[in-house]
Structures are given as structure tokens and as C-alpha cells.
Amino acid sequence: MAIETQPERAQQPGGREPGGALPARPWWMRPAFHTGLIGAVVGYLVGHWLGNFLASGYTQVMNASQNDFAIVLGYVVGTVGWLAGLGVFNDLIRSMLGRPLPTEAEEAGAASGLARYFRYTLNHKVVGIQYLVGMLVYFLTGGLFAMAIRSELLSPSYHVFSSAAYTEIVGEHGTMMMMMMTSVIVGPFGNYFVPLMIGSKRVAFPRIEALSFWLTPAAYIVLLSGLMFGGYPFGWTGYPPLSIQATQGADAYFVAFGLMGLSVTLAGFNIIVTVITHRAPGMRWSRIPIFVWSMLTVSFLFVLAAPVLFGACYMSLTDRTVQTAFFTHSLGGSSYLWQNLFWFFGHPEVYILALPGFGIVSELIPVFCRKPLFGYRISAAGMIGVTLLSFFVWQHHLFDSGINPDMRPVFMLTTEMISIPTGFIYLVALGTFWKAKIRFTVPMLFCLAMYFNFLIGGISGVFLSDVPADTTEHGSFFVMAHFHYTIMGGLIFAFMAGCYYWLPKMTAIKLNQTLGKIHFWIMFVAFNATFLPLFAVGMAGQPRRVYTYASNLQTVNDWVSISSFFLGGSILIFVINFVWSTVIARVREEGNPWRSRGLEWQVSSPPPPDNFDRVPVVLSGPYDYGVKGAPPMADLNPPAGVLAAAYAPSEVEA
Ligand code: HEM
Ligand SMILES: [Cu+2]
């Protein structure tokens, strides 16, 4: 079978007949950020008015102290207005009316330079950079909430915030991080590098990709707006009955989480189809980079898990607005239903956060060890195993909330089993270190730290999957320390490795390596100084989500808080480095500074608009470092005959 890559038609989104240029609009009417904002405000007002109007006949809604219906409709219509203002629906409407679509050149010409980063665009590299900046903003916002939490916990008796405000802040921090950081690697690096790494000009569905990004600012603003309505008192997990009884702030939580669920479903769908259909000739399944394997498997988690979250948020919203009773016990609903739906998404979510991290470190380690990735196939199999198993473990989050006791051993077993494929991925990369001459560059330091941190996170997870241990540690700072080790220590360290490694590719600018090393060491030491003591604090009984604690725990809490300020400061060093290097110093970094074999490094930096001048023909795997006589990974300029032969049926099947 010939691999169908980049069919001609697909090269040109909306391929239209030549001639008939689109009428140009004045700049203030051209869809961009400002028209999006106008659309959002107008949409919110219209939705809010509509909600009040529609609810006016229903006394049970109107007589409640608040009309959630109006708020939710405001958010929803506001989001639609935002997207419409950005121009997301323009091509759809045009093609429904049979009008010509803009050509790629017209799309690109509509805004150039900095302006294109502020508008809906179909170029996967621009979308990747939009995601990168967006994710940094979301991460810094979540981080500020973390600093606020740690400021409050400096003292058990002197309070910076009221207990209610503290709960709001913890909820905002947890939700911002868990919600937005799902895309912290897939968004920037997945969208930017998957096409480059598989030898394609573009992704399968550029419009869907762009839409997935523009939903994220909407989710971010909606979530933050919850603070204006009093926040929500149920942390990041949205448990009823609190979630149904809470005031308007809770609407923001459900709408935002729903929007983000939609965004990642779309993003995953696009990446799956891209990897399956857009590989260059010769890019066999056994040759695709391990990072692409991680993007593919995480995309399956996205499309299978996130719709459940979307549905559950939708049901909560109807409970809150139009008096359905999915989760209201007194009316025949069940709060366990929410717990099951939420964690059916929520556990895969854990691997949504872990797999891309492993993808990055497994991709980088061979480059800096100058050795082939040990056990590439085992690692890919591990990723598939994790993906499948993660749908069979969710009830371990319910061990302590009254599930049928007979189910506990089953879920304890499946949970402990998932450490086997995780172990594959982990140990395989460790095998690459064997007798390697490691180059301790900044990205490599972050990779090594990720391994160290994830080990602690993983081992503490085995304790928590054990029912007797979980019943005592549940709801304590032990759990807190555990998941920060895996997410902050795993995902975020890997994200940093990716930034230092790939930013020179994306911008052709070198980040300052000395500042990078300072950033690394402060972040690594401060991270461990912050979270390691929290295991002990948890075992000593300090509960999560409570703004006070036993006074004998103050010294260690102070230590933790001060360390966490250093941790926050280290992220600032990164931001300063990022801005200083890319805006002020601008030291050019062309070519292939890490001497990587990866396909993405074989083109210029930043890559040309079409990535490759001609469809490349892949000749070997990406990790043949130090292998004598290994051909380059791809022929970027194959003679016409070779390309035709590559598309011809292979000998095996012929
Ligand atoms: C600068 C680094 C960070 C610090 C210092 C930090 C600190 C904290 C603290 C102190 C709490 C507990 C509050 C309490 O229970 O009273 C917390 C909760 C939480 N954090 Fe972080 N955090 C950091 C980064 C992250 C990251 C990167 C993520 C995930 C991507 C994350 C996800 C969460 C979640 C889900 C909760 C639970 C919220 C809840 O109980 O509903 N945090 N964090
Ligand atoms: Cu879980």
C-alpha cells in the first residue's frame, strides 16, 4: 500500500479556483484580536440578556438568589462571539454559501510580522508559538496563586486571607494548572514539531488546530472571572453537592473546564490524523520519533477522556441552571456519578500530563548521550500500554469515598499494574545512559532532573495505590507532595528541557546558557526543598485545602514557603532569559547546535514556511547516534525517481 501523504488538494486549505481576489476590508474590520474581544463582550451581553429573558417565565429559576442560566448563556454566547470575532467561522460560512475561500498566500498576506501571532492563522508553526506564549501566561498565573497559598501557610494563626478566600485561591490554582497545563507540551511542541518530525508540510486540519488554541484564552478568562463571582469552594475536582449548591463562581469552573475539554479533544483529533496520514515516505511506524509516539498516545487519551469531562461539566451546568438532577441525591441523582465521570477523565489526565514529559526526555537523551535510544520499541509499547490501562484505574480516587469494598482490590491491582508500562518507558531511557558520555547541557540537566523527580513521584504513588496506606494519607499534604512531584517535577521540568532545546529551532535565537544553568539549579534545589518536606507534613496529618494547621508544623511550613518563593523566582529567571535572549540580545543560533539527527533539525532555523522544499524521503531511524555507516535520517532533496519509488507499493506487500 502506498502511504498517502500530503495529497495535492490538501496542500491548499480550501483550494479555490484562481482569480477573484477577496475584497479587502479596512483594518479595523479585519478579523483579529480586537474584533475577537468585541465579539466576546457583545456575545456575553446578548447571552446574559437572553438568559434572563428565557428564564423570566420560570419562577424556580428567577426566585433563586441568582440566575445561573443568564451567566452560563453569557459565557457560552460570549465564547462564540470571541471565536466569530476572530474569524473562526468565516471560511465555514463562505464555503456554505459557495463563495471562494482565501488562498494560502492571501491568508499569509493578511497579516505578517508580529500581527500574525495575534490572529487566527492556519500555520502550524505560528499556532505552536501562540500556544507557547499562552501556556507561559497560564502557568505564571497559576504560579502566582501558588505563591499566595504559600504566603498564607507561613503562619497557622496570622491570616493573609479569609478561609473562604483561601479555598478560592486553592481552587483557582489547582484548576488553572490541571486544566491549562494539559496542553503545555502538546500545544507548543506537538503542534510545531509533529509535522516537521514526520516530514510533512502541515497538520491534517489546520482550522481545527487553530480553533483548539483560540479556545484556551476563552477558558482562561472564564476561569479567572469566577473570582469576581465569589469563586468556588470545591477545589479543582468539582464534587457535588458543593458544586451544585455553590454560588455563581462555580459556573465559571464548569464552563471553563468544558471549553478546555473541547479544545484538547479537537487538538488530539488533529494530531492523530496528522500522524496517521501525513508521514513522509519511508517514515514507518518503527521510525517515528519517540516524541511523536508520545503525542500520538496522549492524543488518544485526549479524544477518549476529554469528551467525558465535557459531558460531565455540561450535566453539572444543567443541574445548576435548569434544575436537572444528575448529581443531586435528594432528587434521585447521585454524587458518585460525578466522581466516576470526573475521574474517568481525571486519571487519564494524569497520563495526559506524564506522557508528553516522557516523550521529551526520551527524545533528548539520545542526543546528549550520543547513543541510540535503548529499547525504542519497548518505550513505544509502554506508551500504548499506559494509554490503554489508564482507563481501568479511575476508582482509586474513590477508595475513600464509600465505593463497594469488593472493588477496591481490583482497582488496587490495575493501578499497581500501570507501573509496569510506565516502568518500560522509564527504564528504557535509563538504559541509554549506560556507558554514555553525557553532555551536561541545560536541556539535558532538566531531563536528568525530571528522572530524579519522577522517581520520587512514582514511588509515592505506589503507596497511594495501596488501599490501607491511601485511607490514612488521603486528603493530606502527602497526596499534594506526590502529585506535584509527578506534574511539576515531571511535566514542567520536561517542558523546560523542551524550551531550551527547541527554542533555537523555533526562533533561530540562542537562550543564554549561563542564565539557563542558574535557572536550572535554583529550580531543581528549590523544587525539592519545597515538596520533599510535604510528604512528612502530610504524614504528620496536615490536611489539604485548609488554611490553618497544628502550630508545631510551623517551622517546616515556613521552610517550604520560603523554598517555594525561590522556586517561583527561578521561573522568573527563565522568563527574563526568554525575553532578554529573544528581544534584546538576539544572539543568532542557526543550524544544528545540538548536532541532532532529528528531521526537524535538518531544515533551516526557523523552518521555511512549507517546512521542506520537497517531500523528504526517510532513510533510517532518528536515533542512530554513533552507529557506523548509518545513513542520514532523510534525503531532503530526493531525485524525482526516488520519490516515485518511495510512493510505489513496497516489496513486502507487492
Ligand atoms: C511553583 C510551583 C507550585 C507550588 C509552590 C504549588 C503549591 C501548591 C500548594 C501549597 C497547594 C495546596 C493547597 C492546599 O491544599 O491547601 C497546591 C495545590 C494544588 N496544585 Fe500546586 N503548586 C505548584 C505548581 C503546580 C503545578 C505545576 C500543578 C499542575 C500542573 C499544580 C497542581 C495543583 C493541584 C491540582 C492542587 C490541588 C488543588 C485542590 O486541592 O483542589 N501545582 N499547590
Ligand atoms: Cu488516578
Image: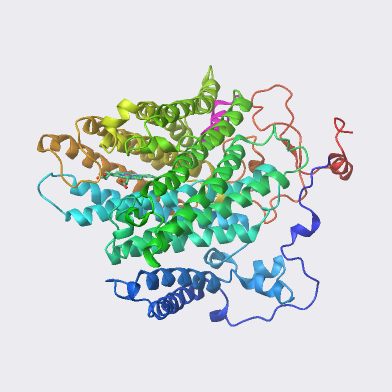
In the displayed structure image, the side of residue 393 where residue 206 appears, left or right:
right
Q: Is residue 583 visible?
A: no
203 vs 557: above or below: below
Magenta-colored stretch includes residue 300: no
- Residue at 37%, 38% (x, y): give it: 398
**Which is more toward the observer, 627 or 392?**
392
Q: Is residue 337 visible?
A: yes
In the displayed structure image, the side of residue 109 where residue 583 appears, left or right:
left
**Which is more toward the observer, 134 or 262?**
262
- Residue at 22%, 39% (x, y): give it: 543
**Which is more toward the observer, 327 or 485?**
327
Dividing the picture into quarters, in which one does residue 496 lie?
top left
Task: Give the quadrant of the N terminus.
Answer: top right
In the displayed structure image, the side of residue 47 where residue 103 appears, left or right:
right
- Residue at 35%, 26% (x, y): give it: 463
Q: Residue furthest top?
A: 435
Magenta-colored stretch includes residue 369: yes
Dividing the picture into quarters, in which one does residue 541 lie?
top left
Q: Position of residue 323 (x, y in %)?
A: 38, 65
Report the span colored magenta: 361-371
